[in-house]
Image: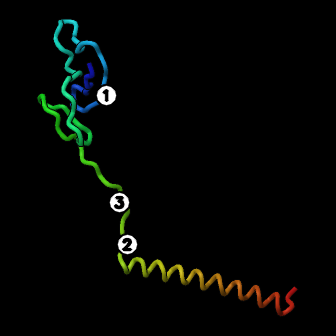
Amino acid sequence: MIVHKIDVVTGNFIEDCQFENLPTLEDGQDDPQYVEEAPPQGLYLPRYLNGVWVEGGVALEPTTPQLSTDEKLTQMAEQLVITQTELEAAQEALDFLLLGGI
C-alpha cells in the first residue's frame, strides 16, 4: 500500500511511502502523519488540511526585470562613450608607433 507522509503541523506533503498496512500509533489509532488519499495531480506544494488536499503554494516563473527603452538607450550611450575612449587611446598608441616613437 502506498501512503503519503505529511507534516502534521503544517499539512505539507513530505513523501510517498510504501507499507503493508497503514501505520498506527501505540494506542492503535492511525498515525496522523500518513494519509491513504493521494494528492490530486497539478498541485504545487500540496497540503493536507482538515482531510482535504489543497494548493500549498503558487509556482512563480523566474522573471528578469525588463529595461525600459530609455534605460536601454542610456546603457548603449554609456558603452559607446567607453568604446570611443578605447578607440582614441588605441589611435594615440598607433600614431606613436607609426611616427617613430620607438
82 with respect to 27 (left or right):
right
Mark 2–mark 3 CB contact (< 8 Å): no
Callout 3 amino acid: Thr
Q: Position of residue 42 (x, y in %)?
A: 24, 42
- Residue 94 shown left or right of residue 9 in the figure: right
Residue located beneath label 2 in the image: 67
The residue that appears at 22% across and 10% down in the rendered structure is 25
* Residue plotted at (18% across, 14% down): 30
Tell me the distance, in whole angstroms, between the alpha carbons under discs 2 and 3: 12 Å
Residue 92's disc number: none
Of badges 3 and 1, nearer the viewer stands 1
Mark in front: 2 vs 3: 3
Give how far across and how far down residue 89 sits, in percent: 69, 84
Pick the front one: 86 or 2:
2
Query: Which of pointers 2 and 1 indicates the residue nearer the eye?
Result: 1
Q: Quadrant of residue 70?
A: bottom left
Residue carrying label 3: 63
The quarter of the picture where the C terminus appears is: bottom right
The residue under the point 23% across, 39% down is 41
SS type, badge 1: strand
Disc number for residue 15: 1
Secondary structure under tag 3 reads loop
Q: Give the alpha-carbon distance from disc 3 to disc 1, as whole Å.
A: 29 Å
